[in-house]
Amino acid sequence: MTRMGKNCIFSLNALFSLFQYNKKMTWYKKVLKKYIKEIFSSATTYIFTVLFLTIWYFYSGEIFQWIWIEPLDVPPLQRALYSALTFITLGRIIYLTRFYKVLWEILGDWQSYKEIKSVIWIILIFVMFNWIIPAFVAVVNWFISIGYNIFKLFLYIVPSFAISTLVVATIFYMRNKYKI
């Protein structure tokens, strides 16, 4: 195998292992777990409220109307959250491509290396905050909105099955959340 072939295989292995982590709880896992619980608990409450309001609209005689909902908001700029998100995405890609090693070999000076590395990190957090996370939230909101409108259409077509599906989903959620 040629040298280029080995590098190509290494790059694929690096990309495949991008989201494989060790089992111990590290700082970014703690931060992400905390914020993900907050985000999804508020989004779940919002979605269940909207679904029950949809049933109320159905029984009050409202006609079907396609509505765009946005249950998730872009999280505010919180250093720990965005640093953790950057660490597991863009920062991991940069680390796996050995960019920092090349930067160290080019600079050779520890102080310059640390300063440039911190500037790069700030730029990565800025990119996450301004483009990546808003795009991700928009895509997730789009999927949730499509699912909501499909459920709503299903409710108007087959009301008994849609309502029973919502009741079963609520019971399942309560059992998992409160261990009932």
Image (spheres, rainbow, N blue to C red):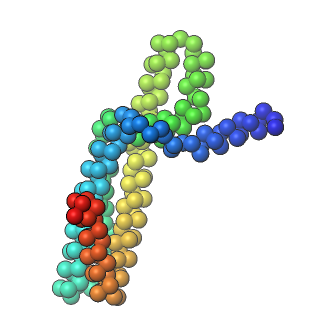
Q: Position of residue 40 (x, y in %)?
A: 30, 55
Q: Position of residue 135 (x, y in %)?
A: 42, 52
| Residue at far right of view | 1
| Residue at far front of view | 180
Q: Quadrant of the C terminus?
A: bottom left
Query: Is residue 151 placed above or below 48 in the rendered structure?
Result: below
Q: Position of residue 88 (x, y in %)?
A: 46, 39
Q: Nearer the viewer, residue 141 or 168?
A: 168
Q: Is residue 5 left or right of residue 21?
A: right
Residue beneath the point at 59% across and 45% down:
16
Q: Nearer the viewer, residue 53 or 48?
A: 48
Image-quadrant location for residue 23? top left
Residue beneath the point at 39% across and 50% down:
134
Q: Is residue 35 left or right of residue 2?
A: left
Residue beneath the point at 42% across and 59% down:
139
**Can residue 126 be seen in this snapshot?**
no
Q: Position of residue 87 (x, y in %)?
A: 44, 36
